[in-house]
Amino acid sequence: MPQTPPFSAMFDSSGYNRNLYQSAEDSCGGLYYHDNNLLSGSLEALIQHLVPNVDYYPDNQMRKIAPKILQLLTEWTETFPYDFRDERMMRNLKDLAHRIASGEETYRKNVQQMMQCLIRKLAALSQYEEVLAKISSTSTDRLTVLKTKPQSIQRDIITVCSDPYTLAQQLTHIELERLNYIGPEEFVQAFVQKDPLDNDKSCYSERKKTRNLEAYVEWFNRLSYLVATEICMPVKKKHRARMIEYFIDVARECFNIGNFNSLMAIISGMNMSPVSRLKKTWAKVKTAKFDILEHQMDPSSNFYNYRTALRGAAQRSLTAHSSREKIVIPFFSLLIKDIYFLNEGCANRLPNGHVNFEKFWELAKQVSEFMTWKQVECPFERDRKILQYLLTVPVFSEDALYLASYESEGPENHIEKDRWKSLRSSLLGRV
């Protein structure tokens, strides 16, 4: 799978854009500008640039400084609320907020509103994490359930939701809910092992305990395995074929909605070896629509087709007249790879020791676009029964999928026969 970063052409082997650096036209106090945009500067100069002085604040009284500080804190708590799960950060915030609130009545009201909003966000995150933990603790292998309580799983996805369009909408509910809890600071934590600008490792020695990125990737994997399980479960060939065609329709509707993450998870599940080897089943399936979807998500040329479709969905979102048209759910693993390679492929500092602003502008651009997409409210009506099934129904492990596949359509060679016997012995206790 190609993993070329989208901005790789901009950077040479040294990890920065020499042309941009050399074209810097203006410097002031150790800061370099181009077309009035700050390109780079020494860390000392950047800090000095932010220190209040007589030009910023003619009067040093708190009532003059307070509005700016309050604005900064409000934007910080709204954009990076998870920073304040750290007790020291919250303690410092409360101390500074108390100082500001001791001034005018207007400040007290704004500070109170800011703190209440932050506490609500952190409480919602805690509740969300509790739900995820509960789902994770109750998850079991489907084969285990079938062996111990064979009558307990009589349903399949079609009996729960016969309409593939409705299922695509419910998948979109799950996607948007999980995306909503991912904070921009989590991208930084995912890639930065130490302070990117200094060698002081203590900056990141105590990581915040959020794992929403991991939980979202786990959801993608679960959906892939759920699709494969639902296809391999039916005993009759025509029922398996019907299940494949059902998921093709679900995937196509996901594409129309702009839900590319569920789309790729479904395609991944249908391309898993235990499913793809069911040749007799696939022979009964009309695959034209599936071929189109696979073409759209083809990884060749660094996912060129997908990136084109994503840009189209993003443009549609900008000019949307309805909530449905605003939906853009990117293929998340690829988004993470893009950010990772941008971070790894470009130096944090230029050869002269200045901070490489060009890199951080590009990182901020990608994360900001994602933050816009994740804030869209899902326009579809929730169906609790379908959502519960998608999130909690047991799925097969990889070995169980292979066993079910061999039971449906027998092994075709000695390697498959040996594996079938081994799986029957280990999973079913049969020889």
Image: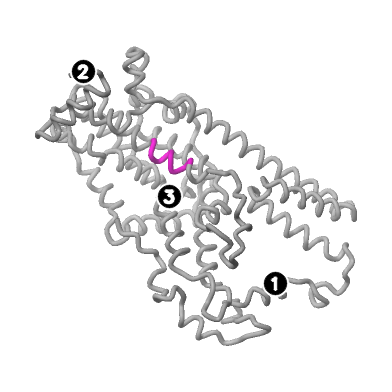
**Residue beneath disc 1:** 47
Q: Which numbered disc flags the more N-terminal residue, 3 or 1?
A: 1
Q: Which secondary structure, mark 2?
A: loop
Q: Which amino acid does label 2 sit on?
A: Arg
Query: CA separation, marks 3 and 1?
Result: 35 Å
Is 248 drawn above or below residue 347 in the view shown? above
Q: Which numbered disc flags the more N-terminal residue, 2 or 1?
A: 1
Q: Which amino acid does label 1 sit on?
A: Ile
Which numbered marker is on residue 332? Answer: 3
Q: What secondary structure prevails in the magenta region?
A: helix
Residue located at (63% from left, 80% from top): 31
Q: In this view, does 124 lie to the left or right of 399?
A: right
Of 57 and 8, the residue lying toward us = 8
Magenta region: which residues? Answer: 215-222
Residue neighbourhood size for the residue with mark 2, other residues' Cα within 10 Å, grouped as few (<14), some (14–19), many (≥20): few
Q: Quadrant of the N terminus?
A: bottom left
Of 256 and 410, the residue lying toward us = 410
Q: Which residue lies furthest to the bottom in this view?
A: 25
Q: Position of residue 293 (x, y in %)?
A: 28, 47
Residue located at (37% from left, 46% from top): 256
220 is within the stretch colored magenta: yes
Q: Position of residue 422 (x, y in %)?
A: 20, 27
**Residue beneath disc 2:** 430
Q: Position of residue 306 (x, y in %)?
A: 34, 55
**Can you tell which quarter of the image residue 70 is in?**
bottom right
